[in-house]
Image (cartoon, rainbow, N blue to C red):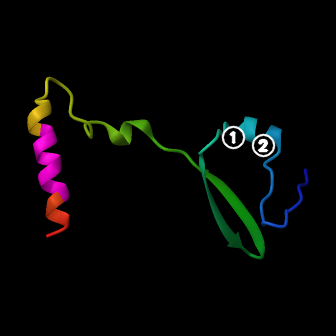
Amino acid sequence: MQTVITSKFQTTIPKKVREQLRLSVHDALEWRVENGKIVVSPIHCKFLDFQNSVKVGKGDIKKDIQMARELRTGKYK
């Protein structure tokens, strides 16, 4: 397979490659040079790495808004 580099140094990933690697819009790719060749690898985000990173349960919206305001104003002091 072959693609062309545009004037903005962009190229298209062939459909067969996208499908085989299950690539989608906004996926990240890692580029590196090995022995004079370009190696491009997909960076797959492991969903379970984010386990317990979001608090769940009943919250206090007024308290959350006040805390956000205090954090924001703290940046400008």
Q: Residue at x 78, y 70 (%)?
A: 37
* Residue ID for mark 1: 21
Query: Dot 2: what SS?
Result: helix
Question: Horizontal and vertical percent for residue 65?
Answer: 15, 40
* Image quadrant in which you'd find residue 49: top left
Residue density around tag 2, few if under 14, some if 14–19, many if 20 or more, within 10 Å: few
Q: Is residue 73 above or below residue 50?
A: below
Distance Cα–Cα, label 2 vs label 1: 6 Å
Q: Residue at x 14, y 63 (%)?
A: 74
Do the residues bearing badges 2 and 1 touch, measured as CB atoms within 8 Å?
Answer: yes
Q: Amino acid at mark 2?
A: Val
Magenta span of residues: 64-72
- For residue 74, side relative to residue 34 (left or right): left
* Image quadrant in which you'd find residue 25: top right
Front residue of 56/29: it is 56
Question: Horizontal and vertical percent for residue 27?
Answer: 59, 46
Question: Horizontal and vertical percent for residue 67?
Answer: 11, 46
Front residue of 36/26: it is 26
